[in-house]
Image (spheres, rainbow, N blue to C red):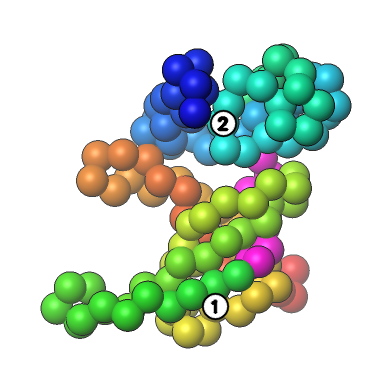
Amino acid sequence: MTQSDKGAQAQYQQALDDGRFLIQKCAGCARAVFYPRMICPHCGGGELAWTSPSGRGTVYSTTTVRRKPEAGGDYNVALVDLAEGVRLMSRVEGVAPRDVRIGMPVRARVIQQDGHGLVVFTAEDETQ
Ligand SMILES: [Zn+2]
């Protein structure tokens, strides 16, 4: 990671802390870029603009992490593919960890945890 990539990641975190989920989009190849960086990993272009993703995604993989009830109980770790074509690690809330399924449609939201913004997902109603 270069020093300037850290700058991009700091901007990403600052937006989350303000309650906004932003990803980058490359002006050169029009592809979405995540995790935030200075140079497009697809085409090597350096013009990356911040953009608000739709928030819609699909669970790519899911793991239940076991934890004692007194520590908060089991929780879910998921890789989610956003509609924009990037993948991020997060968790799905609002359903039991073992009920999170690969292919499940989910929607992103920003929560504040320990003083910092964080992207989590909730299950999307599949009938809509
Ligand atoms: Zn590009």
Q: Are marks 2 and 1 in contact (CB under 8 Å)?
A: no
Is residue 112 part of the magenta span, yes or no? no
Q: Residue 54, located in which quarter of the rendered image?
A: top right
Q: Residues within 10 Å of mark 1 (few under 14, many from 20)?
A: many
Residue that protrudes farthest toward the front in the picture:
1
Q: Which of the marked residues, 2 or 1, is nearer the chain's N terminus? A: 2
Q: Which residue is mark 2?
A: 36
Residue 59 percent location from the top left of the image: 63, 67
Give the residue at x 62% y 38%: 34
Mark 1: amino acid: Val
Q: Which residue is mark 1?
A: 100
Cβ of mark 2 under 8 Å from ligand 1: the answer is: no
Span of residues in magenta: 52-60
Q: Is residue 118 visible?
A: yes
Residue 122 percent location from the top left of the image: 52, 64
Kindly report the distance in space between the C-alpha atoms of the residues bearing marks 2 and 1: 27 Å
Foreground residue among 52 and 81: 81
* Local secondary structure at mark 2: loop
* Local secondary structure at mark 1: loop
* Pair 2/1: label in front: 2
How many numbered discs, if any? 2
Is residue 59 part of the magenta span, yes or no? yes
Give the residue at x 64% y 51%: 87
Question: Which numbered disc covers residue 109?
Answer: none
Cβ of mark 1 under 8 Å from ligand 1: the answer is: no
Q: Is residue 5 above or below residue 31?
A: above
Q: Residues within 10 Å of mark 2 (few under 14, many from 20)?
A: many
Q: Is residue 52 visible?
A: no
Give the residue at x 23% y 46%: 114
